[in-house]
Amino acid sequence: MRYSTQIKPISYVKTHAAELLDRIAEEREPIIITQNGEARAVLMDIRSYEESQETLVLEKILALADQEIERGETVPIEEVMAEFGVRPA
């Protein structure tokens, strides 16, 4: 992705909102919105936003799991399987 083509000033966004919404829905590329020459926000399609939020949640879960492992807070798989009534294959 080339961010240089995805940067738009707020004035452009105001006058071309519907066009930009169609574009991000089709291309699934975010638009960086500037104000007074500075990047201020990102406009993205809802599907990409939801996917990024799900990814962040999974990364947080993995980080928590890594911390638990480092602290030695683990349970042998045999105990977990027994708790759920699963017999080893």
Image (cartoon, rainbow, N blue to C red):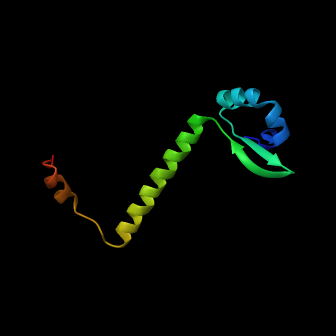
Residue drawn at x 68%, y 36% as measured from the top left:
29
Task: Please count the marks in the image.
Answer: 0
Q: In the rendered image, which quarter is residue 4 located in?
A: top right
Where residue 6 sits: x, y (%)?
77, 39
Depth check: give the residue in front, 89 or 8. Answer: 8
Q: Residue furthest front?
A: 14
Where residue 49 sits: x, y (%)?
58, 41
- Which quadrant is home to the N terminus? top right
Please tell me whether residue 64 is drawn above or below residue 24 in the rendered image: below
Q: Residue furthest bottom?
A: 71
Residue drawn at x 76%, y 31% as measured from the top left:
17
Q: Residue furthest right?
A: 36
Horizontal side of residue 48 vs 88, given as left or right: right
Horizontal side of residue 76 vs 60, given as left or right: left
Residue drawn at x 53%, y 46% as measured from the top left:
53
Depth check: give the residue in front, 17 or 66. Answer: 17
Where residue 23 sits: x, y (%)?
72, 28
Residue drawn at x 47%, y 51% as measured from the top left:
57
Horizontal side of residue 66 vs 56, given as left or right: left
Q: In the rendered image, which quarter is residue 52 located in?
A: top right
